[in-house]
């Protein structure tokens, strides 16, 4: 190719190459194809599922804790992108940080220098983690978990990791090996030879530790699936047991960390708990650039990176990239400036207390639990004959259908986005942006009350949709 051709930008790709890339034009021309494109080129079951439950919305824009559709209607987000949007969408401080880092044209990812942003973000994270010393930056929560598993095995010289039943630590092969849900694991064997113990069962933990081959226990202080909190005193007692057997405590704070539960980390709710390794991700990204971090004690890092020959024994191609680091720094600054953790604690207490007050009012509502802005709403078998027969029909078809029946009208009638907390669970999990306040609590509780009134009065629309779900569940068997 001649210099002349290069200068005029002729890449040999025809007339289309001269048009350049115009994101606005591309979305204007082809944005309406979104569901068709997913069906054709990506996971084809996603659009199918969204069409079935009526979640196939077209959201045009988002800000804070809200979306807007093409008709200008607002939707309250009580899902936060599975926890990624801790500060809500498009926080101006995070946006500016990303514009600034792009405009700076930094010499990023040279691989053979030390840029300032990773060190600055590590310093800021560690300031909230006073018993930890060093950080490894990757690109996601599952990668943070993978790092912790590798570091624990190498540092202790032992092969086995313990995890809790019903845990979720990621879906890559290593983290899948400590995933407590068979639905995610089925068909992907062989996995690593790790072992499940019941959440809160110290006797089971002690039995496994006596075998002498356990590198550590990985645990979510509050499990995302079902929103189950570790029993009081469990983490400290587990830590003492683990250390007695020269094993490590690994806290998976990918969803619970960075203020979600009303403390910076969920494990901080219990005095004396100082995990050896801590995994964070999700909200650290500001919702823009994927980032994960594994924080650990100095001796662990020094054992893994024991010599210059081992300097790259664990690394990530995009880890510590400038955009992710800038986003993380901006997120932590906003959290400090806007007192996000305190807001999550206060607003979460308000939300949970308002919902808990409804338990005695509705026989289908069995429990409200959680901490901060991580709240689980559990449904269960009613007492009245008419409701009991309908509940039984749903349970025979597929457990979890009633919770889905609640989620759908919350979106369809009240424009509130929520999720069922896990497959085959009658639990809705609320993990809204940490910036919500009393207005959003009022809107959710009013909508939830209306849905519960409809369910208990035998509202035709809701129970007719239940019949649709039953037919779909039976057809998928």
Image (tube, rainbow, N blue to C red):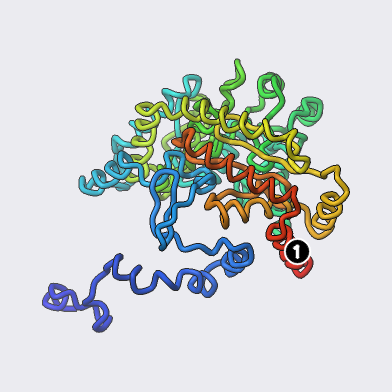
Please tell me in which quadrant of the rendered image residue 253 appears: top right
Q: What residue lies at 71% left-to-right and 55% top-to-bottom?
A: 459
Foreground: 178 or 327? 327
Q: Quadrant of the C terminus?
A: bottom right
Query: Which residue reaches farthest left?
Result: 4
Q: Residue at x 72, y 35 (%)?
A: 359
Q: Please, is residue 402 above or below residue 11 in the view?
A: above
**97 left or right, relative to 141:** left
Q: Is residue 163 above or below residue 287?
A: above
Q: Residue at x 32, y 47 (%)?
A: 109
Residue 124 lies left or right of residue 194; in this view the side is left
**Which image quarter: residue 8?**
bottom left
Seen from the viewer's position, the closer of residues 344 and 224 is 344
Q: Position of residue 59 (x, y in %)?
A: 44, 59
Count of residue discs:
1
Question: Observer-nearest residue: 167 or 414?
Answer: 414
Residue 133 picture location, percent across and down: 46, 24
Say which element carries label 1: helix
> Which residue corresponds to mark 1?
467
Which percent across, then down, holds residue 66?
44, 48
Relative to 126, say whether 194 is above or below: below
- Quarter of the image with the N terminus in it: bottom left
């Amino acid at each position: 190719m001649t210099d002349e051709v290069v200068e005029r930008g002729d890449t040999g790709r025809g007339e289309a190459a001269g048009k350049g890339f115009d994101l606005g034009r591309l979305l204007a021309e082809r944005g309406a194809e979104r569901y068709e494109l997913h069906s054709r080129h990506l996971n084809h079951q996603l659009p199918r599922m969204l069409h079935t439950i009526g979640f196939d919305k077209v959201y045009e824009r988002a800000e804070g804790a809200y979306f807007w559709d093409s008709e200008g209607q607002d939707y309250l987000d009580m899902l936060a992108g599975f926890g990624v949007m801790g500060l809500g969408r498009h926080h101006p401080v995070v946006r500016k940080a990303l514009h600034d880092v792009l405009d700076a044209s930094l010499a990023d990812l040279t691989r053979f220098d030390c840029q300032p942003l990773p060190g600055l973000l590590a310093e800021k994270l560690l300031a909230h983690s006073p018993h930890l010393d060093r950080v490894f930056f990757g690109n996601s929560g599952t990668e943070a978990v993978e790092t912790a598993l590798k570091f624990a095995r190498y540092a202790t010289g032992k092969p086995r990791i313990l995890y809790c039943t019903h845990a979720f630590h990621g879906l890559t092969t290593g983290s899948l090996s400590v995933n407590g849900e068979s639905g995610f694991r089925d068909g992907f064997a062989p996995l690593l030879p790790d072992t499940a113990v019941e959440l809160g069962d110290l006797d089971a933990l002690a039995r496994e530790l006596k075998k002498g081959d356990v590198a550590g226990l990985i645990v979510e202080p509050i499990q995302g699936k079902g929103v189950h909190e570790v029993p009081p005193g469990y983490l400290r007692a587990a830590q003492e047991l683990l250390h007695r057997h020269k094993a490590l405590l690994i806290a998976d704070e990918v969803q619970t960390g960075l203020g979600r539960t009303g403390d910076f980390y969920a494990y901080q709710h219990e005095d004396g708990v100082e995990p050896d390794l801590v995994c964070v991700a999700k909200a650290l990204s500001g919702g823009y650039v994927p980032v994960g971090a594994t924080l650990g004690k100095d001796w662990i890092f020094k054992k893994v990176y024991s010599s210059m020959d081992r300097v790259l024994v664990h690394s990530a191609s995009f880890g510590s990239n400038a955009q992710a680091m800038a986003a993380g720094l901006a997120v932590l600054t906003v959290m400090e400036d806007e007192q996000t953790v305190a807001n999550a604690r206060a607003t979460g207490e308000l939300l949970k207390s308002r919902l808990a007050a409804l338990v005695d009012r509705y026989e289908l509502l069995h429990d409200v639990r959680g901490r901060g802005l991580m709240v689980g709403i559990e449904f269960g078998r009613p007492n009245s004959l008419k409701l009991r027969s309908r509940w039984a029909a749903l349970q025979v078809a597929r457990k979890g259908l009633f919770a889905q029946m609640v989620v759908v009208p919350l979106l369809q009638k009240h424009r509130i986005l929520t999720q069922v907390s896990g497959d085959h669970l009658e639990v809705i999990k609320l993990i809204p942006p940490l910036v919500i306040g009393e207005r959003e609590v009022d809107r959710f509780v009013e909508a939830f009350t209306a849905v519960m009134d409809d369910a208990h009065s035998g509202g035709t629309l809701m129970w007719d949709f239940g019949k649709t779900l039953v037919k779909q569940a039976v057809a998928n068997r």
